[in-house]
Amino acid sequence: MVDVAIVAYRHWELTQSCLEHLRRQSIAHRVIVCDNGCDQGTSERLREGYPEATIVRNERNLRNQVACNAAVAAGREEIVVVLNNDIDARPDFLERLAAPFAANSRLGSVAPLLLRPGEEQIDSAGLAADRTLSAFARLKGRPPGEAQGEEPVLAGPDAAAAAYRRVAWVQVGGMEESSFGYMTDFDIALRLRAAGWETALAPDAIAVHVGSATYGHRSAQQRRMAGFGRAHLMRRYNVLRSPMAPRALATEAVVVAGDILLSRDAAALAGRIAGWRAAADCARLPWPPPQALDARIGFIDSLRLRRDIYLRPSSP
């Protein structure tokens, strides 16, 4: 038995598809849906069509990670799976995603293999990160057959679909609520690794991720929130006081300049300024262990991975 925590805000057709796929799962599970202040009758539709689901209702729309924490807190099982509402899971998804926990008591999180619609390309196989704490969707755009490889290093799961051991989740405090939706999955991955928990990929736990359903691919809002999350994380982990500060500054300068040229607005820059300011009063966090980062991702590699975000659809 596992808990499945889903945050729903509008896009009922996505939530409905996600729940229909969960109904076909091969193991027992409990679905918890947080209606995150939606004004389109989500709770009523859930009660009518999915009476087996537990509903957590927010009267107003809150930050995604706040809603996610509320959904997780409403459960009780040892393993909790966090899903975006735009995930369509294969029937054995939950079974295969939960299986690795039984073999390793120090396993705090497991990443599934997320595919793009059509199932010909990987959307993510967890997250990878360079030494400036820049995170990337691991193996994004590659054929599904490459998911078995050990490179790049897995930092942790992408919160579009992720499994956590509840005791590990509780120990680190769940999702960070002072930031916005972007980078919070990477942040909890780093905190889990710093606390001594291990992570793993379950390449046979497969689901399709529609992607960018909430904010729209490369919209100004999406880019602003991504910038907010990046700067917020950089300040909390003291990236600019680390030996990687020159490289981090150079990377951010190139990324922001490129965004301004391509998008013809300053959304990415404005988001970074807001995120940096918002993190001023937040507690500083310890640098993650070396095994959580991939030292082989160099400066040019990092820029190439950032470029790929513009050329390929991104996940919220």
Image (spheres, grey):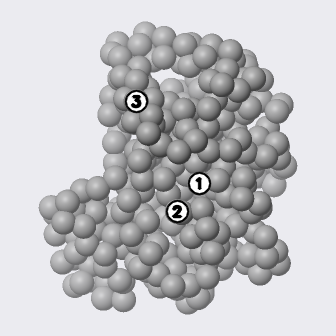
Q: Residue at x 65, y 79 (%)?
A: 95
Taking 91 as reference, is 141 above or below it?
above
Sooner in the amino-acid sequence: mark 1 or mark 2: 2
Q: Across the whole image, how many numbered discs are drawn on residues?
A: 3
Label 3 is placed on what type of residue? Arg
Labels 2 and 3 touching (C-beta < 8 A): no
Residue tagged by mark 3? 277
Query: Dot 3 lies on which element?
Result: helix
Locate residue 138, reporting x and y percent. 68, 44
**What is the x, y in percent for residue 259?**
45, 17
Image-based side of 173 in relation to 316, left or right: right
Amino acid at circle 2: Gly
Residue 27: x percent and y percent? 60, 87
Q: Which residue is mark 2?
A: 174
How far is the residue under mark 1 from the one under mark 2? 7 Å
In the image, taking residue 48 as reference, residue 220 lies left or right, namely right
The amino acid type found where label 1 is placed reads Ile
Q: Which label's residue is closer to the chain start, 1 or 3?
A: 1
Question: Looking at the image, is mark 2 or mark 3 nearer the viewer?
Answer: 3
Mark toward the start of the polypeptide (2 vs 3): 2
Which of discs 1 and 3 lies nearer the camera? The answer is 3
Secondary-structure class at tag 1: helix
